[in-house]
Amino acid sequence: MRVALGVGGGIAAYKAAEVARLLVQRGVQVRVIMTSSAQEFVRPLTFAALTGQKVITSLFPEGGAEGTLSSAVEHIGVALENDLLLVAPATADLMAKFAHGLADDFLSTMYLAFPGPTVLAPAMNTGMWQHPATQANLATLRGRGITIVDPESGFLACGMVGPGRLAEPESIVDAVLRKLSVRRDLEGETVLITAGPTQEPIDPVRYISNRSSGKMGYALAEAAVARGAKVVLVSGPVSLNPPVGALLVPVRTAAEMRDAVFQHLAEATIIIKAAAVADFQVVRVAEQKIKKTAARVSLELDPTPDILLELGRRKEDRLLIGFAAETQNLKSEARRKLEAKGADMIVGNLVGEGAGFEADENEVVLVMRTGEVREVPRASKRKVADAIFDEALTLRLALYASG
Ligand SMILES: Cc1cc2nc3c(=O)[nH]c(=O)nc-3n(C[C@H](O)[C@H](O)[C@H](O)COP(=O)(O)O)c2cc1C
């Protein structure tokens, strides 16, 4: 989910930093736009550090005519790539501009171009708030379907007591998530996810591994955090940032992954094995780098521990979901794996053709212990992750509700 967060020039601008932090913690990507007045109160760097994204501070890009077309019309790009526009604090001035369609800075211009839902959290002095002009603008904006997170009553920075104080950051974030209809249906769950490849050492500088990027596992972790779960992400070496709010347990080899998984098994209610664990490990890892020679060299390999199989035996009533990356016979291979390992669901993943390993999109088939099969059409890995959780919750009801 992507939210554009507009920050207006009021005392409460500093509270927008907490709003940004909470959204990021819930797995939302936040793009901050600051009005020039807002920059008098808080530095853009605060928001850049909290969101990991460049903050937009003006309508006209640096470099002027030398800028690229896409950066020059950034207000349209930002309008189209975000799912929701939140303005906090919304000043009296911004509400007037939005109500009347003025477009003299980035935020007001983008508001006009924005096709999605808008949420405003006004904050101002009581007199400004109660002024008929502000109230008329408010009525216009409400009439347009804009969600208003009403200001609270209390002590204001100007010394007055009355309505006008910015709503609490938690309430603003709740309103945003409600508007995005984010399900919080994993609250109370602990989801244990494995992701990425493993590396099995040959000598101090070489290893056996595979092309897994970890993107699917990380998308699952992001979705689970957003839906309210506690997430333990056991990850092989990847070059991805873990979602804020997930506990990252970095591992390298299949044996380390096994140990980490069983260390966290007790607390888990749902286990998803999205990692591409190496199937073989080197029997005798050389202590020194193996020298290059003209002669043929062979490596003796042992199978790695079968984590999924062991989980299948020890899972009790936890929901166990495995992955099967195949190049052919997807459904039958997924069904075979499900039965052999004692899993509740296998996510069959056809690798190659822009899906599966390394890709940003995936197309999967979900094979369930109930015998049901569901195809998830090609979509972003994040959307596929949500479809997996939707199906997992339905499956658990079918499997365990009666017992
Ligand atoms: C110290 C100070 C505090 C202010 N606080 C607010 C405020 O809380 N709400 C508001 O609507 N305007 C407030 N203003 C007035 C706005 O900064 C002013 O209307 C500005 O033009 C808003 O610009 P913007 O809407 O582009 O951010 C304040 C001004 C100053 C100097």
Image: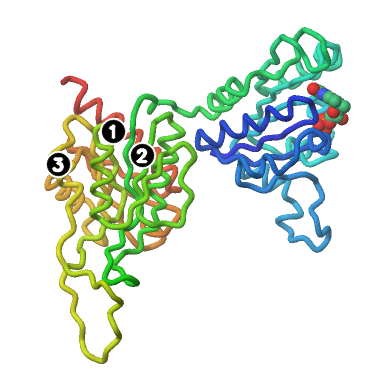
Q: Is residue 109 above or below residue 298?
A: above
Which of 303 and 1 lies nearest the eye of the viewer?
303
Which of 90 and 367 lies nearest the eye of the viewer?
90
Ligand 1: quadrant of the figure: top right
- As helix, strand or loop, the secondary structure at mark 2 comes to strand
- As helix, strand or loop, the secondary structure at mark 3 comes to loop
- Among the two numbered marks 2 and 3 on one chain, the one whose residue lies closer to the N terminus: 2
- As helix, strand or loop, the secondary structure at mark 1 comes to loop
Q: Distance between the residues labelled 1 and 2?
A: 8 Å
Give the quadrant of residue 9. top right
Q: How far apart are marks 2 and 3 (CA)?
A: 22 Å
Specify the label residue 351 is tagged with.
none
Give the quadrant of residue 119. top right
Residue receiving disc 2 = 232
Q: How crowded is mark 1: few (under 14 residues within 10 Å), some or many (20 or more)?
A: many
Q: How crowded is mark 3: few (under 14 residues within 10 Å), some or many (20 or more)?
A: many
Q: Distance between the residues labelled 1 and 3?
A: 17 Å
Residue lying at 76% horizontally and 35% vertically, measured from the top left: 42
Residue lying at 36% horizontally and 24% vertically, measured from the top left: 188
The amino acid type of the residue labelled 1 equals Ala
Residue receiving disc 1 = 268
CB under 8 Å between discs 1 and 2: yes
Q: Position of residue 352 (x, y in %)?
A: 35, 63
Viewer can see residue 151: yes
Residue lying at 39% horizontally and 31% vertically, measured from the top left: 229
CB under 8 Å between discs 2 and 3: no
Residue receiving disc 3 = 342
